Each structure stands twice: as structure tokens, then as C-alpha cells.
Image (spheres, coloured by chain):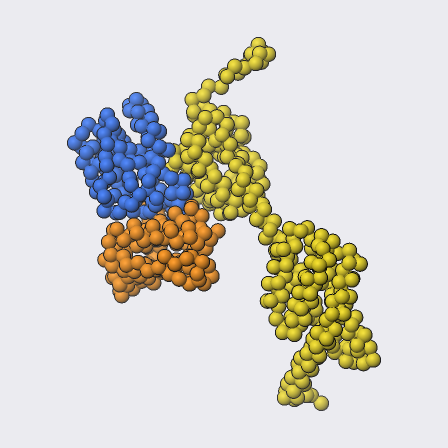
Chain colours: A yellow, B orange, C blue
Amino acid sequence: MPESDSNKRRQRTSRDENATTLLTELVAHLREYRTDLRQEWAQRITKARLLTAMTEEEVFTEATAVYDQYVEALETGTFEALQAYARNLSERIIPRGVETDEVVGIVLLLRDVLARSLFAKYQHDFSTLNRILDAYEPAANRIANTVAVGFVQERERIIREQQEAIRELSTPVLQVRERLLILPIIGAIDPHRARQLTEQLLHGIRATRGKVVVIDLTGVAAVDSSIANHLVQTVEASRLLGATVIVTGLSPAIAQTLVNIGVDLGKMNTVGDLQGGIEQAERLLGYKVVPTTQEDAATPASH
Amino acid sequence: MKQAEDNNFSISAQITCAEDVVVARQRGRTLARAMGFSPSDATLIAAAISELARNIVRYADRGELLLGKSEDGMLFVIARDNGPGIADVEAALRPGWSTSGGLGMGLPGVKRISDYFEIVSNAHGTTVTMRKRKR
Amino acid sequence: MAVPILKQGDVLIASIQSALTDVDLVALRDALVEQVASHRTRGVIVDVTALDVMDSFASRTLRDLAHMIRLRGARTVIVGIQPDVAFAMVQLGLTLENIPTALDLEEGLAFLSAVRHAR
């Protein structure tokens, strides 16, 4: 006989109520046995040789905080506080050398410790155990996920910051002769890096009174149209500073991208390779390139 | 000026003459720098403000410029006037080639550098809203 | 605020201050055009080192200035565009078209004398 809608609704509500009651019972249990369970967990962490970068006191302090956050998340069903705590914790322990697998490991260990204590408590009531686990498992998995993701995101943020710091320290703009600058670009260029390179080039032109700039793209296989557009802007901005720009090492792919965005390659000063570009730059600057004879090669050049 | 760390604050400037345009763009640059924009982007924002403020002076005699930090951390500029409005908004936003394009109001450029750009213009006046995020 | 215009031989040099209003810029344009006409000027250098913002009005006025001066037989060079200003200009799509630009006053003068000798 088909169930009526109101019947179904009543069943669903009573199921939800059950789940809530169960979770409340579960949380009460976890709070009651907090000291013991936390101890067991700490022992398991040591046995698994995790968090070796931290002292015992530190592990205990963090374990207490994680435990309480864990139970709180189970109780409220919200994970923002846990997420915030995970990031905060990560920010503190990553510089200490704690790895992702350790963080994931200890959260999973806690999950196991709590699950086992549930098994122990409800071992004589299989159907209640099942229902409690139905309530516990999704929440516990979500917690493990939240903490792991929080840790990884924090780690990625720190790596990005470090990369950024390295980039800012390095000066990619090279002055090879008076008034001649070279900007060799290697690898992938994202919009942020592109902007940084342009700013460094323009400031470099001003600082060194650069008159000719060779932008070498030999190390770049391809760029998307927004970066290609950025390259054009860089050339134009350099011209406003009175510099002539020679672009070298254009791959066919980049040349095509430039054409696609409407650039007249005939109007852009391009040379096949860096060496050729430097020679042209020297000609523009009025340097004469004189080939050395055998004799000259044997004696040290005088500058 | 309030600290840029506060959320949702704005500076209001009355725009009635050429000097006001200069003051508005200087304030815009100061705000952008205080919000942590790079010197390069602060210059960009100052230029955009200059365009919007000038349009008020030229086409509406007087108006108001609101500068501030929005809830989501972006810098916003709202340029409002009660002038006669822009007859052909589409043309005003159309980028030109060698000429300044956009009927000389500099709007194509402002739109190009904005992360959010909106213009409402009718016989009662014109309101241009732009927002830019730190990058 | 009037922009001072210096005469160096047959070259006029105008150095712009940063707080330049539209009115000042137009006045500068007119003053330069008038002086080119009245003196025997071969070249004009507009030094925008102190200009903190270049918008569509400024670039248009500089283009007009160069055009009007060219009609009177003299060349114009814009010098001293700041790196941030140059970058902002290209992002906004502003152009000085074919007006020569140079890094600084020294380069501007070098350009003008090269042009003179090329004739």
C-alpha cells in the first residue's frame, strides 16, 4: 500500500529527530569521557610517531583544542569555527615543519579513537550502534576533510608568499651595456608576474636611462591573449619612456597569438634570437661590432 | 581621513570646478595607497577618478564623487550628477583607435581597468559606478 | 598656476608641476603656441616628470599642442613620463600617437638637435 505524503513527512521528521537525539547523546558521551579519550588519542599520536616536531606539552595543548573543536563541530553541525581553527593551527605548525600527512593522520586517529569508544559503549545494542554511527560518520568525515583542506590551503598560501618574495628580490632586468637592457623571460607567465615584469622593466629603464630594451621570449613557449596584450602594452609603455624595444625569440605560437589580437608584427621590432637582438640593439646605440683577428684573441683585451 | 582598515567607509567630494578634479584624484590616490593598492594601480585609479570628475565639471557643472572601500574589500568610486545626461551611452563606451574614442569622456578606458563598471544616464542625470580590487 | 617656460637657444622648455588643472594645461598649450610663433623656436620640450596622472584630456591636449606647434614649423618632445604613469596610460588605452617622447630633458634636447641636423 503506497504511503501517504503526510506519513512520509512524519517518518522523515522522526528520523531527523532521532538523528539529533543520537548526536546529542554522542556529544554528551564524548564530553563525559573527554579526559580518557584525549589521553588515548595523545598516546596513539606518539605511537604513530606523528607531530615529532612538537614538544609533549605542545601536542597536549593542541590536542585539547582539537578535541574540543571536534566535539563542538559534531554538536553544532557547523564547521566555520573548526575551519578557522584549522587555518590558525596550520599557520603555527607549518613553520615548525609539520607535514600534511601528520595533520591528516592525527585527525583520523581521533576519529578512530572516538569510533572505538562508541563501539565499546553500544556493543550490546547493535541497532543503536548502527544508528549512532549513521549520525557520527558523515560528521566525522566532514571534520577530517575540513581540517585537511584548511591545512593544505594554508600551506599553499605560505608557498605562494615565499615565491612572491623570491620573485621580488630577483631583478630580471639586466643591463648589459650602457643604455642597453635585456629582459629574458622564462617559463609560464601569469597576469601577476606579467605586471611585475613590466613594472620592473619600466623602472629599470628610468633608473639606468635605458635607450634600447631587448625582451627575450625564447624561454616562453606560448601565452594566452591577455598576456600577449600585456606584452604589447609593455612595448608601448617603454616607448613612452623613450626606449626602443626589440622582441626576440618569438615562437610561432606566440606570433600567432599576437596576430590574433590584432598586432601588426611588421610594426613590432622582432628578431629571431637573443644574439641577433643584442647586435641590432648595439647598432641602434651606435656601437660598432668589430670581429677579432687570431692575434687579438691571443692577447687580453684592453677595456 | 578615516583609517582604511575600517570597513564600509566613504569620502564624499563636491565637484564644481577644475581644482576639484585635481583634489579628487589626489584623494583617490591616497585612498588607494592606504588600502594597499600598488603605486601603479593607485595611479590608474587616480586617472579614472580624473576622467569621471572632469565629466561632471564639463557636462553637468556640479556633482558629487564618492570614494570608499566596499564590503568585499574593493575600492569603489561613484560619480553622480544631475546634468542633462549622455545622449548615446553606447557611443560613449565605444573604444576608439587613434582618437580618444568614447566621445572624449575617457569612459572606455575607465571601464577597461575596472573590475565592475556601471553607468546610468538619463535626462535627470548620470551616475557612474566603478569598483576595483587589489591585485 | 602658470607653468614656467624657459628659453634655451631656439628651444622652449616647459616643466609641468603636479597639481595641474585642465585650465592650467590649456593655458600652457596656448602660451607655448604663442611663444613659438613670436620667437624663432625650432623645438619645444614639455617636461612631465612631476605629472602624477595622465588622463584622456591631458593626452589629447598634449597632442593638440604638438600639432599646433608643428603647424608653426617646430617640433615637440614630451619628456619625463613616469613609469607608473606610462603603464597607466597604456592600460587605459591612451596614446600620444606620433608625438616623440624621451626619457628626460637631456634626451629630449638630443632628439631635437638630431632632428635639426637631419634637415
Check the image and name the residue furthest to the top: A295
Q: Where is residue A220 in the image (x, y as percent from the top left)?
A: 56, 39
The residue at 49%/30% (across/down) is: A175
Instruction: Evaluate whether residue B117 shows in this view.
Output: no
Q: In the image, is residue C80 above or below residue B3?
A: above
Quadrant housing residue B69: bottom left
- Give left or right: position of A273 versus B65: right
Q: Where is residue A97 in the image (x, y as percent from the top left)?
A: 68, 50
Q: In the image, is residue B86 above or below residue A179?
A: below
Check the image and name the residue furthest to the left: C38
Q: In which quarter of the image is the N terminus of chain B?
A: bottom left
Instruction: Evaluate whether residue B47 shows in this view.
Output: yes
Q: In the image, is residue C2 above or below residue B87?
A: above
Q: Position of residue A174 (x, y in %)?
A: 51, 32
The residue at 25%/61% (across/down) is: B83
- Give left or right: position of B55 versus A37: left
The residue at 79%/78% (across/down) is: A122
The residue at 42%/57% (across/down) is: B4
Quick one: B60 or A16, which is closer to the camera? A16
The mark tally for this picture is 0
Check the image and name the residue furthest to the front: A57
Q: In the image, is residue C87 above or below residue C119?
A: below
Quick one: C20 or A12, which is closer to the camera? C20
- Give left or right: position of A221 versus C15: right
